[in-house]
Amino acid sequence: QAHMVSKPLLLLLLLLMHASSEVLLEKVGRAGVITINRPKVLNALNLPMIRQIYPQLKKWENDKETEIVIIKGAGGKAFCAGGDIRAVTEAGKAGDPLAEDFFREEYILNNAIGACKKPYIALIDGITMGGGVGLSVHGRFRVASEKTLFAMPETAIGLFPDVGGGYFLPRLRGKLGLFLALTGFRLKGRDVQRAGVATHFVESKKIPDLEKELVDLKSPSADDVSRVLESYQNQSSLDSEKPFVLDKHMSDIDSLSHSLCLLSQTLARMSPTSLKITFKQLQAGAALSLPDVLVMEYRLSQACMRGCDFYEGVRAVLVDKDQSPKWNPSTLEELSDQTVEQCFSSLGEKDLTF
Ligand SMILES: *[C@@H]1O[C@H](CO)[C@@H](O)[C@H](O)[C@H]1NC(C)=O
């Protein structure tokens, strides 16, 4: 009878149901399975989700009964289309600590994925951008399908390619990563693997079988996981003959990106501050470990929260959707090296620590 359930208990149950519904954390066989479960917003990542995933990942990492971790997105369209950036800028305007906590805790999770001692397998079978890249690219295995759409589009919203972009992008071949970072260029399907963002390509319709085979593995090593992924990849011939979309442009990309000015025509839509920060971020990141990159990026995130382009970019692209942000400063020339330099300076006791 309904009246038998006390009001506080009912509230607690509702809270629990709500809290657990945005991300599912399940043990399937000997695998820990994370399902990002906000399909209506393309599985955008928010702070409550980060706060559920991180402790569970650490628990599974130290649990003898758990041998691998799988992460995937619900709904069939997106793995994760990015962080819930709109909430972050609203918090920034209101002086709410979410604007610090979101980046801090997201980057701590990105680092934990990079350091995960057990095989971590991201099934990026759909849109994978920004924060979604941070949930996958640092893991040991990333499986793309023909439905994967990858981008780091942050320079268009006055941010920079964070979540460890400063680590993985400069490690792609030539200047490909810098190109992807500055332009937000979208890679699709097999090209996500060809670029080195994914480790494997498996046709979308085969991914449920792949997942089943993975969770059924008995005491799998990374090599065992690798063999299963390779065998599914070998059965996926879709687009295998198609050349990499940027093949013809790679020599241009490699020579262009020595100078931002040469790229400036293509990049007219992007925040000049974002472009300069990103250029320097990737240059520095090429020689840093993932944790050190994330410390740098946390400083940059807070510099963006103090500035104006991030708010303006989110307004123009995500809120009003007029697609015409008014950047300040509006040109690269107006932005001094000193101003850019300041974005990289230490936050003292507010610096990110692991
Ligand atoms: C996949 O194909 C490659 C190339 O044909 C072959 O060398 C490899 O052994 C195959 N791997 C599996 C697991 O079937």
Image (cartoon, rainbow, N blue to C red):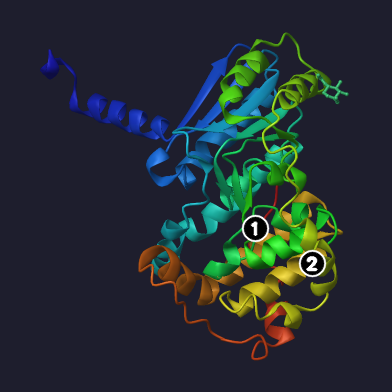
State left or right for residue 36 relative to residue 106: left
**Mark 1 residue crowding within 10 angstroms, few (<14) / some (14–19) / many (20+):** many
Foreground mark, 2 or 1, reads: 2
Determine whether 57 is above or below 131 in the image. above
Tag 1's secondary structure? Answer: loop
CB-based contact (under 8 Å), mark 2 and mark 1: no
Residue 164 vs residue 354, the one in the foreground: 164
Q: Quadrant of ligand 1?
A: top right
Instruction: Tell me the kind of residue under disc 1.
Output: Asp
Query: What is the quadrant of residue 90 in the picture?
Result: bottom left
Please name the residue shown 77% across and 50% down the image: 290
- Residue 54: which disc? none
- Residue 162: which disc? 1
Task: State the image coordinates of residue 121 (x, y, percent, origin top left).
Answer: 68, 30
Task: State the image coordinates of residue 69 (x, y, percent, origin top left).
Answer: 65, 25
Would residue 348 be seen by someone viewing this image from the given angle?
no
**Image quadrant occupied by the N terminus:** top left
Mark 2 or mark 1, which has the lower sequence index?
1
Extreme front residue here? 241
Residue 68 vs residue 242, the one in the foreground: 242
- Residue 253: which disc? 2
Determine whether 173 is above or below 211 in the image. below
Q: CA distance from mark 2 to mark 1?
A: 21 Å
Would residue 103 be seen by someone viewing this image from the given angle?
yes
Please name the residue shown 34% across and 28% down the image: 17
